[in-house]
Image (cartoon, rainbow, N blue to C red):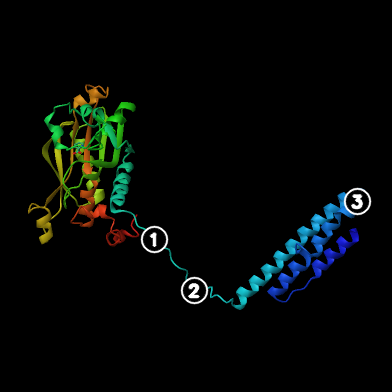
């Protein structure tokens, strides 16, 4: 019986094939489940005397392994030959390209702004889209009945009047200040919600990035310089900014930031209403009341904050005239941002 195994081993090693069909014959001849010679030997296992079973079994398994390896080898050699000789398929034809998606312009702008602030040491903080009254309003120096609450028309959660969809990402900054030690340097990108009529210039859902910097001796000059750095990184080294006094309950003093857009074309006149300047964000020195609300000592520390709408920035950067386009997901619009990162 043991000799039979050796004979078969030799037969397998010497087996010659000329075509891919021969390879299949090889398989059936030796490894076919019913009449294959190797398989047949397995059936004889029961007739082997007990004291030889161990050696026989080992040899048999080795034989089967060898036969399988040889089969694979023969197959491979034919496949290689086929490729060399020119297979029925033309392997040089270009493949079928999968359609590539593109990043949404809002994501592009967000990523760029985030990386600009990261370079000067700002961390990124994110929070919940459903907020409570304290984080969205009260802690930001907007107590109940404060008229400035009307500046941001709010969607409330019906089942709990203390909850709402956040109207700005300033709420994230309150959360961040509550759990982080000063010095704080962070930006909060995110989606925000306001109950506004949808038009070319407004939507009830939009995106913001707000920034916050708190430390000893932070001054308005630091704020101005940080914003100038940002605008020049984002819009180009030649860009100029100007600050106009404004009002936000959470900052004092407060300002609105304009960037100089130019007055070269007719479109420039239209976009800037004939002034050449475009408003891009709000900012100011964090109101001492806000610092008190999150247990930061306003005698010791000061800080600045700013906030901008990403849709507005993206509209300027890519010259998009209707904000609704960001939300329609029309592929003809989105495809234009292919390849941008
Ligand atoms: N939270 C303000 C808004 O949504 C923007 C802002 C942030 C203004 C920080 C000043 C300082 O309109």
Q: Nearer the viewer, mark 2 or mark 3?
A: 3
Tell me the quadrant of the picture where the N terminus can be found: bottom right
How many C-alpha atoms fall within 10 Å of the one at disc 1: few (<14), some, or many (≥20)?
A: few
Mark toward the start of the polypeptide (1 vs 3): 3
Q: CA distance from mark 2 to mark 1?
A: 20 Å
**Front-lying residue, 225 or 122:** 122
**Front-lying residue, 134 or 165:** 165
Give how far across and how far down residue 297 sits, in percent.
Answer: 25, 21
Helix, strand or loop under label 1: loop
Q: List the residue tagged with mark 3.
A: 52
Give how far across and how far down residue 266 sits, in percent.
Answer: 10, 61
On screen, residue 75 versus residue 11, left or right, reads left
Tell me the quadrant of the picture where the C terminus can be found: bottom left
Ligand 1 picture quarter: top left
User: Do callouts 2 and 1 mark residues in contact (Cβ within 8 Å)?
Assistant: no
Vertical relation: 76 (above or below) 119? below
Q: List the residue tagged with mark 2.
A: 93
User: Do callouts 1 and 3 mark residues in contact (Cβ within 8 Å)?
Assistant: no
């Amino acid at each position: 019986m043991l000799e039979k195994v050796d004979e078969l081993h030799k037969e397998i090693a010497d087996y010659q094939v000329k075509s891919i069909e021969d390879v299949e014959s090889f398989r059936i001849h030796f490894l076919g489940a019913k009449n294959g010679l190797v398989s047949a030997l397995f059936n004889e296992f029961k007739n082997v005397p007990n004291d030889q079973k161990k050696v026989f079994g080992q040899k048999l398994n080795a034989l089967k392994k060898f036969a399988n390896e040889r089969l694979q080898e023969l197959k491979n050699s034919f496949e290689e030959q086929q490729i060399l000789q020119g297979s029925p398929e033309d392997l040089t034809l270009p493949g079928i390209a999968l359609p590539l998606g593109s990043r949404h312009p809002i994501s592009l702008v967000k990523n760029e702004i985030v990386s600009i602030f990261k370079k000067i040491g700002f961390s990124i903080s994110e929070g919940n889209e459903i907020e409570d009254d304290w984080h969205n309003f009260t802690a930001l120096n907007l107590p109940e009945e404060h008229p400035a609450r009307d500046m941001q028309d709010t969607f409330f959660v019906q089942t709990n009047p203390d909850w709402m969809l956040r109207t700005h990402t300033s709420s994230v900054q309150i959360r961040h200040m509550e759990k982080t030690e000063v010095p704080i340097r962070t930006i909060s990108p995110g989606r925000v919600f306001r109950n506004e009529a949808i038009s070319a210039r407004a939507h009830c859902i939009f995106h913001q990035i707000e920034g916050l910097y708190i430390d000893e001796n932070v001054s308005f000059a630091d704020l101005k310089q940080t914003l100038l750095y940002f605008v020049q990184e984002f819009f180009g080294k030649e860009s100029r900014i100007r600050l106009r006094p404004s009002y936000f309950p959470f900052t004092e003093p407060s300002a609105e930031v304009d960037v100089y857009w130019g007055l070269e074309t007719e479109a420039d006149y239209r976009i800037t209403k004939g002034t050449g300047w475009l408003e891009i964000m709000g900012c100011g020195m964090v109101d001492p009341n806000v610092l008190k609300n999150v247990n930061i000592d306003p005698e010791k520390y000061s800080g600045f904050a700013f906030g901008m709408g990403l849709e507005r920035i993206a509209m300027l950067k890519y010259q998009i005239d209707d904000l609704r386009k960001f939300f329609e997901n029309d592929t003809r619009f989105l495809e234009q941002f292919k390849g941008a990162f």
